Amino acid sequence: MNIRAFSKTDQSSVIALWNACGLTRPWNDPAKDIDRKLAVQPELFLVGEFDGHIVASAMAGYDGHRGSVYYLAVSPEHQGNGFGQVLMASIERLLTEKGCPKMNILVRSSNVRVLGFYDKLGYKPDETVCIGKRLIADHE
């Protein structure tokens, strides 16, 4: 798999990947999420290509205190081949180069398979609670 920075021409393929992986939600507009990411640290939005097709993505960020990753996706037909591990290693390298001391990753508690994936990479649950508040509605 070849890992590279996201390009605007990748948008439809990446959104299709996110849909195939069950990452989209009705209250989040994926195109708006992409536009927002391209405005802030676009170099931390990576895609993975295999045989000329986008098969993986990861959207990371660093706020000066903690790093994060969202939309980590590997196409269902390529899951289990190590692509997710390779993509996460790239994200961790980029964040480390920026001086990021720790990553925090949000995973739905019901997503046992993904929690297992992150556990194998050394990520463990923190004693925290995630809370949120929507500031901009993507849909009326």
Image (tube, rainbow, N blue to C red):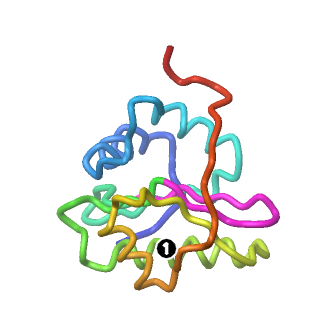
Q: Amino acid at mark 1?
A: Met
Q: From this viewpoint, which residue is outermost toward the left?
A: 77
Residue at (68% x, 72% y) in the render: 95
Q: Position of residue 107 (x, y in %)?
A: 46, 60
Is the residue 11 above or below the residue 56 in the image?
Answer: above
Q: Residues within 10 Å of mark 1 (few under 14, many from 20)?
A: some
| Segment tinted magenta in the rendering | 57-70
Count the labels in the image.
1
Judged from the image, the secondary structure of the residue bearing numbered disc 1 is helix
Q: Quadrant of the N terminus?
A: bottom left
User: Horizontal placement of 53 versus 62: left or right?
Assistant: left
Any magenta on residue 64?
yes
Is the residue 111 above or below the residue 32 in the image?
Answer: below
Q: From this viewpoint, which residue is outermost toward the right?
A: 64
Residue 44 placement: quadrant: bottom right
User: Horizontal placement of 55 versus 136: left or right?
Assistant: left
Q: Position of residue 100 (x, y in %)?
A: 75, 73
Residue sitting nearer the eye, 126 or 2: 126
Residue sitting nearer the eye, 139 or 18: 139
Q: Position of residue 34 (x, y in %)?
A: 53, 40
Q: From this viewpoint, which residue is outermost toward the top?
A: 140
Label 1 belongs to which residue?
88
User: Horizontal placement of 95 versus 109: left or right?
Assistant: right
Any magenta on residue 95?
no
Residue 11 placement: quadrant: top left
Residue at (53% x, 59% y) in the render: 106
Residue at (37% x, 76% y) in the render: 117
Residue at (51% x, 47% y) in the render: 7
User: Horizontal placement of 83 versus 69: left or right?
Assistant: left
Give the overall secondary structure of the magenta segment. Answer: strand
Q: Position of residue 82 (x, y in %)?
A: 32, 79
